[in-house]
Amino acid sequence: MSFETIKIERLAGALGAEISGVDLAKPLGNQTFQEIHDALVENQVIFFRDQDITPDQHKDFGRRFGTLHIHPAMGGIPGHPEILPLHSDAEKQYSANGWHSDVSCDPVPNMGAILLAKVLPDTGGDTMFASMNAAYEGLSGKMQHFLSGLEAHHGSVHLFGPSRHENDKRPNAVHPVIRTHPVSGRPCIYVNSSFTTHIVGMKPKESRAVLDFLYRHIETPEYHVRFRWAVNSIAFWDNRSTQHRAIADYFPQTRTMHRVTINGTEAPFYRPH
């Protein structure tokens, strides 16, 4: 794939690329937007450096890719409900650092997210990303065929507890274990240890064995890229084809990130290829 308005440097074999030659503080031309979009689909997670952007510019960039999500329980930064602050320090240690796909418990999960580094620890605080397409391709043909007909339940009650309000039920959904990326058409593993509770139609021990195998498989280093942050760096991941995890190795230092999340437009599906 060739690009005319941006420069791309691949960072790992399975996924990840750093994009340069673009200033996200300025409105994107249609060709530049399309090339960034194509680079995201192709590389699954893309990174930008030295992007000193305002909250409005952060949101404007996200809106080029879809409508923005407003978290129903966690407030945004002042005046910008679409920008979710992720903050940890000596008083608030970051804990959600397992491999996951964002809110897979929703009937229509997020398309992606754009994370901007604002304050960083002296060392540590990297983020890792894993390609679920590469993980799928790493399975045997027999295992691919077996998984392609399965569905899994995703929920959040086990993470956050039951809702205190009857009309505010915790989201849950059933999705295919292997999903087809709606743009690239590539098959991707779509279960994760944070939200997936069980495989539909299996006995509990059977479901646990299959899920545990997939979780171990996803941890294979060849499917990963690890990003070292700098202030004003951006990571933009495709939530349809990746999982990610933060490395919480910097306590009690401070780490503050601003996140814009892009709504999905359709439920995950599987199309035989």
Image (cartoon, helix red, strand yellow):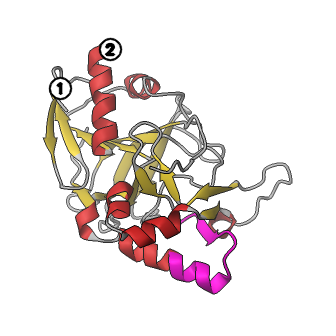
Q: What stretch of residues is rendered in magenta? A: 194-210
Horizontally, residue 89 falls left or right of residue 157, namely left
Residue furthest to the right in view is 166
| Residue 65 in view of the camera | yes
**In this view, 69 is above or below 251:** above
Horizontally, residue 118 falls left or right of residue 271, namely left
Quadrant of the rendered image containing residue 197: bottom right
Horizontally, residue 135 falls left or right of residue 81, namely left
Q: Residue at x 46, y 24 (%)?
A: 63
Q: Residue at x 37, y 73 (%)?
A: 217
Quadrant of the rendered image containing residue 196: bottom right
At label 2, which amino acid type do we have?
Asn
SS for callout 2? helix
SS for callout 1? loop
Marks 2 and 1, how far apart at CA? 13 Å
Which of 71/201 is in front?
Answer: 201
> Looking at the image, is mark 2 or mark 1 earlier in the sequence?
1
Residue at image mark 2: 30
Q: Residue at x 28, y 16 (%)?
A: 31
Residue at image mark 1: 3
Determine crowd level at label 1: few under 14, some 14-19, many 20+ residues with C-alpha closer than 10 A.
some
- Residue 186 position, x and y percent, is 39, 47
**In this view, 95 is above or below 180:** below
Q: Residue 205 magenta-drawn? A: yes
